[in-house]
């Protein structure tokens, strides 16, 4: 059924269609609309999940952890400082291999205080042991949310679905909502192999001595690596049901003969695609959307870069004092190629700064022959003190 929906409303309906049984969250902009709409669906009798109001994001993560271990499909959502407040529990959820799904409505991290979009929050949690999937539009947000539950419950790992705050969460689009029968066919009832049962007592999160700790980490690492095969398989299974694909690990569009590639994450991908379509100054470009950041699809990226002479990485986060987070991982992955493309890394759109259509041709026209240091491309020098120039 095709409906005009705000991104948050569409995600909420996907969570309900997945038959989530427990939802716990604490309000934070720009995530709040998602859980507000789930609450409305419950109040209107369109959903039957247990909605738990908590006093903080730390509690929200703790509630869904407990619910999932007790045998319920559970879901939460957050953003920015809320995600950071969850940090300790996120590592516990991942280390305990609890299958949960969480939407991160990506927002800048304070200070300075900003409520607008970039991806610094989810990037700060990249090593927590969650699968991280990024969505380029709201249709992908719906489809990826449903796929996330199946990925999480197949591998018993948590999945973070990242959507750009405001740019997607607060934007009205025509969305194809799948029928309940389609979702039920795609997503089997919740099952967790180690569900708590008073007749068969188990302990979770016990002390692990050095003799076993490394082996536990290896098992967790391997589970994330296994997702490299599962994510495209689940996407293909969803395409059979719905007719739509999200691109698996890495979506590649544009001119396959192009010598210039541009890789990004999230909603910027759509802006770049529009720029290439309408502005001849962009020239032939191969566009890539890095849907899966964890696990990192190094082999798929190397294949997608075949024949490229230069690759531009545009990201909405930065590792201060080092470089771009995605740029560094891309360079490491491509270093195994005999003739890797030159990788140029830039941050754009930090703290919600607009990414206009003419950014791509301006950036491509400014590229040097050899890559320079990672930098923020859309800085306004007039706003910087003289000593910083």
Image (tube, rainbow, N blue to C red):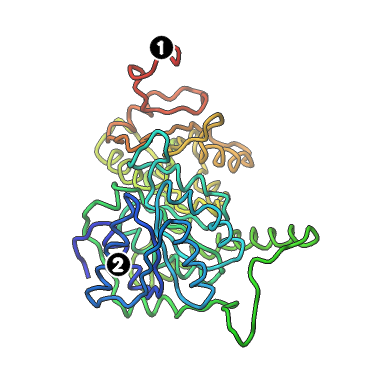
Pinpoint residue 14: horizontal percent, then vertical percent.
33, 67
Seen from the viewer's position, the closer of residues 172 and 244 is: 172
Seen as rendered, the residue at the extreme left is: 4
| Mark before the other along the chain sequence, 2 or 1 | 2
Q: Residue at x 27, y 42 (%)?
A: 274
Q: Residue at x 40, y 62 (%)?
A: 54
In this rendering, the answer to whether 361 lies above or below 168 is above
| Secondary structure of the residue carrying numbered label 2 | helix
Quadrant assignment for the C terminus:
top left
| Secondary structure of the residue carrying numbered label 1 | helix
Callout 2 environment at 10 Å: few (<14), some (14 to 19), or many (20+)?
Answer: many
* Left or right: where 242 falls relative to 317: left
In this rendering, the answer to whether 363 lies above or below 58 is above
In this rendering, the answer to whether 277 lies above or below 178 is above
Seen as rendered, the residue at the extreme top is: 386
Residue on which the image places disc 2: 38
Pinpoint residue 253: horizontal percent, then vertical percent.
38, 48
* Left or right: where 206 falls relative to 38: right
Seen from the viewer's position, the closer of residues 305 and 232 is: 232
Q: Residue at x 48, y 72 (%)?
A: 67
Pinpoint residue 65: horizontal percent, then vertical percent.
51, 67
Pinpoint residue 383: horizontal percent, then vertical percent.
34, 19
* Left or right: where 251 falls relative to 40: right
Q: Residue at x 33, y 73 (%)?
A: 17
Residue on which the image places disc 1: 386
């Amino acid at each position: 059924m095709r409906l005009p929906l705000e991104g948050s409303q569409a995600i909420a309906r996907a969570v309900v269609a997945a038959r989530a049984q427990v939802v716990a969250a604490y309000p934070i902009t720009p995530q709040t609309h998602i859980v507000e709409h789930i609450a409305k669906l419950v109040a209107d009798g369109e959903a039957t999940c247990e909605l738990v109001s908590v006093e903080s994001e730390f509690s929200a993560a703790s509630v869904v952890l407990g619910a999932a271990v007790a045998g319920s499909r559970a879901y939460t959502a957050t953003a920015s400082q809320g995600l950071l407040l969850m940090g300790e529990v996120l590592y516990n959820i991942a280390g305990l291999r609890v299958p949960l799904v969480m939407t991160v409505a990506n927002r800048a991290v304070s200070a300075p205080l900003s409520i607008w979009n970039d991806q610094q929050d989810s990037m700060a949690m990249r090593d927590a042991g969650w699968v991280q999937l990024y969505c380029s539009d709201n249709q992908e947000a719906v489809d990826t949310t449903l796929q996330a539950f199946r990925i999480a419950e197949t591998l018993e790992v948590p999945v973070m679905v990242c959507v750009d705050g405001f740019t997607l969460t607060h934007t009205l689009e025509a969305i194809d909502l799948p029928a309940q029968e389609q979702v039920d066919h795609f997503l089997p009832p919740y099952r967790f192999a180690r569900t708590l049962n008073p007749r068969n007592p188990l302990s979770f999160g016990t002390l692990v001595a050095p003799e076993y700790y490394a082996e536990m980490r290896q098992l967790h690492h391997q589970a994330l690596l296994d997702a490299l095969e599962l994510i495209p398989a689940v996407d293909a299974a969803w395409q059979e049901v719905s007719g739509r694909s999200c691109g698996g690990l890495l979506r590649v569009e544009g001119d396959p003969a192009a010598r210039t590639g541009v890789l990004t994450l999230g909603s910027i991908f759509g802006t770049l695609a529009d720029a290439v379509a309408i502005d001849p100054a962009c020239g032939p470009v191969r566009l890539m959307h890095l849907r899966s950041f964890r696990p990192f699809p190094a082999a798929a990226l190397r294949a997608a870069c075949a024949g490229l002479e230069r690759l531009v990485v545009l990201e909405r986060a930065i590792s201060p004092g080092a470089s771009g987070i995605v740029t560094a991982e891309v360079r490491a992955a491509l270093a195994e190629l005999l003739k890797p493309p030159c990788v140029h890394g830039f941050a754009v759109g930090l703290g919600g700064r607009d990414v206009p259509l003419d950014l791509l041709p301006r950036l491509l026209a400014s590229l040097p022959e050899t890559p320079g240091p990672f930098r923020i491309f859309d800085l306004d020098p007039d706003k910087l003190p003289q000593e910083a120039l």
